[in-house]
Amino acid sequence: MPSGPSITGRVPTRSLHLLVLTLLIALIPWLTAAPAHAADNSVLGIVVRTVTPVVAGAGDPITLQLDVSNSASSPSAPTTLNVLLGTERLDDTAAVDAWAAGHQAASGRLVAQTEVPAIPAGSVTSLTVTLARAGDLTRRPYDVVALSLEIGSAITHTFVGVQRAKEFEPLSVAWLVPVTLDAQPGLWTSPSVDRWHAWEDALADDSRIGRLITATRGTEVTLAVDAGLLTPVAQASAPAVAPSATPTPSATPTPSASPQTDTQLQALDPLEAEAIVRNRATSRLRAALADRHPILLAAGDPDLAALTDNPDPAVALAQQQATTLAADLGGRADVAWPVDPRYSDDAANRYAAALGQRPAATIVDRDRLAWRLDQGSAGRKSRSEVPLLARASALSAAAGQAMVAETAGAARQLFLAHSLTLLQESPGLARTVLVAPDRGLDADPTALNELLTFARSVPWLSSTTVSTLIDQAAGADAVTTAASGDEAPIPVSPLSPAVRTHLTELGAEAGEVGDIRSDGASIQADVTARIAALTSSAWRGHEEAFGVVMQGLTQEITANRNAVRVADQTINFLADSGRVQITVVNSLDVPVRGVRVQLVPQRPILRIAQDTKVVDIGANSRTTVTYAVDALAAGNVRLEARVTGPTGRAVGPTTSMLVRATPTGAGIYWVLGGVILVVFALGLWRNRRQRRRAAATGATTPNVVQVDDDGDVIEQARIARDHEPEVDRADTVEERA
């Protein structure tokens, strides 16, 4: 029997299509909403603010205060923050730094979790996450544990401290904070209102330097201060101090009616205004340090490592200045802190030679020295009997970061981790540690004091002083050596040998120009100070800023050297002896005096009896100088006009002038005399010849006067009569009758 169409076979297929369509319609809202709620955790940031307690007991909870930020342009979705245990071993400073800088997900177990709400675009929310029991994180008697804070792909690493039992001898920590100037070109430009404003800002109470001094008052921190910040500056109106002299700290100029307002200061000469501003700051700083017993660094904080290849006498003078100030302030000036942290016996000897004294201690980095169990403290002595202070560089770097508000929370935990790695080297030995952040520290007062409080709460840290470390170094066994294969990079100094030679030449040129300027003493002192400032440690790693100052100084001194000159000209000298006049130009804004102008012929065909004249020239003026010159032969000769100061040093460019000498000489007078005689003889001959002709023809020459034998003038009528032809007088009478 043939089969027909089956209705029952079509019904399931149609139902299946309807079912699929219904499911798709139901999923449309979910599919379209999913992208809006998908979390892009890469735009989230996690910052550790505080961890309490600093080091937890085994049964104590640990609380982390965090800030979670959303840098996206749209709100983040609600999510979860997970805290996982890191499995990396924190055995040395390199491992600690690597964990702190890393952002990889941890492979350890989950130890805590908290919900993260939706965060508006560009906003920050605070979170608290608690680890229930510190003892669950480690089984060691004391430990610093690595943690990973993770919100999806947003990951931050940190550390927490745990102590079950005290099985160690604490480390005694001494704190040393540098107070030196920044690499700021604006402090060392040409004298101007902007420059003394820059000094005003750099030394104000709320400046970086002012905050450091204020924040560390009443704490265990010792300050290492650039003695140049505490040295008064001579005012322009006061007798100038010779550049080579050591300034006397007690000689602070204190005018009875010192200008107080910015307007009053702007009315003064810029150098005088700057001296007032800096001397006020100096008085404040010295008062603030009066009872602090600071360490005084050589004035200007010279870069000892860069300068001692060829010792500069100015460095020894800067050290003397620091020694004088230390006596006044009850501090000490016998600690060398080269910016180069490496150690060698040769370098130590060069430092001593440059400073003019052997320091009581030289600060170097701890990791640049060979490790010895019996030389684990900060105070050490090299085999060549050089006392050393070994700075814990990694701990110091973490301390510097912890003193900055933005990074304080995370950096405190990093400081904790580094302190434990130091402890673990010899936990059973009592040792000292030097914490000394790098120069240029811009500390937030609150963050700095929070770090000190934090350190006091670490059970394996105690406190000591830098002076104690210096005494320790003096009494240490002379066994310390430099680490082998020490090739770690250090900031580059811009003070290459060529640059140092150039600075020396600039100083000499500045002295030459100062010899003649009416304000030469103050200008020369200022330029000398600016050149000395370029030898500071502050410029390490700041070559561009250094170049700005050096280029400006070079251009300024060159312009001054070219400002007094002899105007170029060509001279035609048409005599055996005569006078030559030259014009001397002064384009400076101040008068010059005692300018010596010397004329030097480049060929011996000219002779100048007094070849050097001394002149004074007003500001933006010119004058004429006259010289007596003899020409010994004919020809062209170059005449050099040299401009020097009272000491004979060049103060302007040499001008080469062309002289065309054409002397007449004695022979020309014989020739002229001979010509005159010939002309006179020819005249006599011609006159006599004319007389003979006149006598022969009976003619007389008009306007010719004749005399008789007695010397009497013959009248013209008589002359004519005497020359008439003879005739018969009778005929004449008859004719008349």
Image: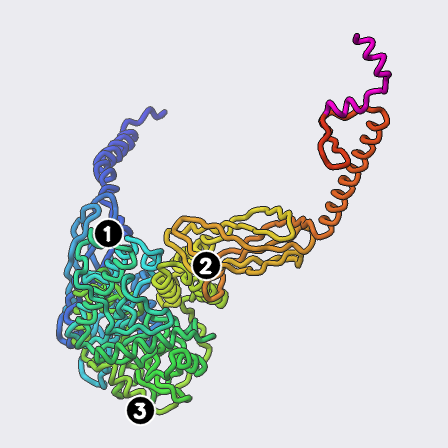
- Mark 3 or mark 2, which is nearer the start of the sequence? 3
Residue, x 31% and y 89% (percent of image)?
A: 474
Identify the residue under disc 1. 267
Nearest the camera: 610 or 366? 610
Residue, x 24% and y 85% (percent of image)?
A: 468
The image shows residue 354 at horizontal and vertical percentages of: 41, 78
- Mark 2 or mark 1, which is nearer the start of the sequence? 1
Looking at the rendered image, the disc whose residue lies closer to the viewer, 3 or 1, is 1
Looking at the rendered image, the disc whose residue lies closer to the viewer, 2 or 3, is 2
Q: Which residues are magenta?
A: 716-737
Q: Secondary structure at mark 2?
A: strand
Identify the residue under disc 3. 475
Location of residue 725 with respect to 263 vertically, above or below: above
The image shows residue 29 at horizontal and vertical percentages of: 21, 37
Q: Residues within 10 Å of mark 1 (few under 14, many from 20)?
A: few
In which quadrant will I find the C terminus? top right
Identify the residue under disc 2. 595
Q: Main secondary structure of the magenta part?
A: helix
Which of the 4 image quarters holds residue 47?
bottom left
Answer yes or no: is residue 571 visible. yes
Q: CA distance from mark 3 to mark 1?
A: 58 Å
Q: Secondary structure at mark 1?
A: loop
